[in-house]
Image (cartoon, grey):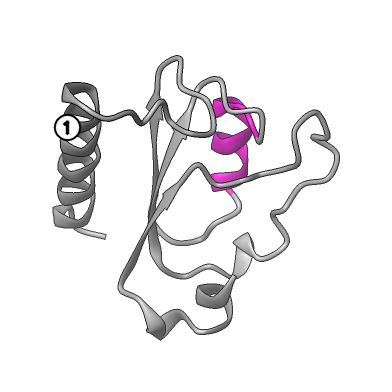
């Protein structure tokens, strides 16, 4: 929300598990500030996140006039299934690679 009001505060955003709405309350969307967002934004979201489905996230990203992308983590919930060990390293590598690719592309 801060970047919607002060876009010069960051060049780009990485949003992990954005809480689109409270669990089981899709009518209470938290999207009012999205049309004001001018920063390129990469969203990372689990396909089983109770705070919003991947489809709901795709629809919400259409409200943002800046460059956006959604990286979905298959089968992950709001915690993105982040665990210690090799799986955590794979997750981090996937997100870092997606972030680098997203911000290397022309706007």
Residue 76 located left or right of residue 2: left
Label 1: few (<14), some or many (≥20) within 10 Å?
A: few
Q: Is residue 96 above or below residue 25?
A: below
Secondary structure beneath label 1: helix
Q: Residue at x 56, y 46 (%)?
A: 62
* 74 w.r.t. 81: above or below: above
| Magenta part, dominant SS | helix
Taking the magenta stretch, the answer to whether it contains residue 60 is: yes
Assign the C terminus to one quadrant of the image: bottom left
Above or below: residue 55 compared with residue 44: above
Q: Which residues are drawn in magenta?
A: 52-62
What is the quadrant of residue 59 in the picture? top right
Residue drawn at x 56%, y 20% is: 48
Q: Position of residue 85 (x, y in %)?
A: 20, 26
Q: Residue furthest front?
A: 84
Say left or right for 38 vs 27.
left
Residue farthest to the top, as pictured: 75
Which image quadrant for residue 31?
bottom right
Q: Residue at x 22, y 38 (%)?
A: 92
Q: Magenta stretch: residue 81 in it?
A: no
Residue 64: x and y in percent read 54, 57
Left or right of residue 60, residue 69 in this image: left
Q: Percent from the top left, x then y, of residue 96?
A: 18, 45
| Residue that numbered label 1 is attached to | 89
Residue ID at (18%, 27%):
90
Question: For this rendering, which residue is in front, 86 or 2?
Answer: 86
Q: Residue 87, how many percent across, how many down?
A: 23, 22
How many numbered markers are drawn? 1
* Image quadrant containing the N terminus: bottom right
């Amino acid at each position: 929300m801060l970047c919607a009001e002060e876009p010069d505060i960051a060049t780009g955003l990485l949003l992990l598990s954005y809480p689109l709405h409270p669990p089981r309350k899709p009518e209470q969307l938290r999207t009012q500030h999205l049309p004001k967002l001018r920063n390129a934004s990469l969203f990372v979201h689990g396909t089983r996140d109770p705070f919003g489905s991947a489809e709901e996230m795709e629809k919400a990203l259409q409200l943002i006039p800046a460059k956006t992308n959604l990286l979905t983590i298959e089968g992950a919930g709001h915690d993105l299934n982040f665990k210690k060990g090799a799986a955590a390293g794979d997750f981090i590598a996937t997100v870092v690679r997606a972030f680098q690719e997203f911000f290397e592309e022309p706007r």
